[in-house]
Image (cartoon, rainbow, N blue to C red):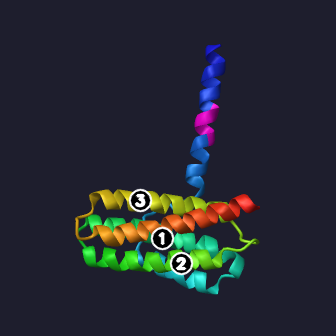
Amino acid sequence: MRYSTSCTALILLAALAAPAGAYCSDETAPDQQSIAALEARVDQAPAREQCFLYAELIHQMTEFSLRQYAAGDVAKSTAMLKQIQQLANKVHVSLADDNKRLKNAEILLRHAAFHLREMLHSSSYEDRPLVEQTLAQVNQADNDAMMQVFRK
């Protein structure tokens, strides 16, 4: 009996841990060069891959913005949050029935929203409106992507 419950717990843990690593395309922390390279890649990508690439770009920009804010560079962080808002609108526009890796895009957006919530809790009173607005737009893009996943 102990063996079966420990096996069940191990299988459950493995099943829950696998999707968490599925969204992360790179283990290194994003920097401006990798973000610029990804932006160039999005512009050249076919329409069915753009939604995922926009989500990946939002994810990387969110992590970069969070690091910049923690380092005290509020100006760079704020500029990055404004770009994230624009990209969240592009995610909504790029959603289509034949999107490639739509579930992975939804996972990336959810993870970015989680980081934005962390940033919201640690941000100053003056910075909160921008973070809240960015979080709302990323959440909307995440919801739109999730609804598209369930339509399939």
Whether residue 30 is visible, yes or no, is no
Crowdedness near tag 3: few (<14), some (14–19) or many (≥20) residues, C-alpha within 10 Å? some
**Name of the residue lying farthest toward the top:** 1
Observer-nearest residue: 141 or 104? Answer: 141
Q: Position of residue 140 (x, y in %)?
A: 53, 67
Q: Position of residue 64 (x, y in %)?
A: 39, 69
Q: Could you say which quadrant of the image residue 107 lies in? A: bottom right
Where does label 1 land, which residue? 137
- Residue type, mark 3 in image: His
Where does label 2 land, which residue? 89
- The kind of secondary structure element at disc 2 is helix
Q: Separation of disc 2 and disc 3 at Cα?
A: 19 Å
Q: Position of residue 152 (x, y in %)?
A: 77, 61
Circles 2 and 3: CB atoms closer than 8 Å: no
Where does label 3 land, which residue? 115
Start-end of magenta stretch: 11-15
Circles 1 and 3: CB atoms closer than 8 Å: no
Observer-nearest residue: 9 or 147? Answer: 147
Residue at image location 63% in from the left, 86% down from the top: 44
Instruction: Give the main secondary structure of the magenta stretch.
Output: helix
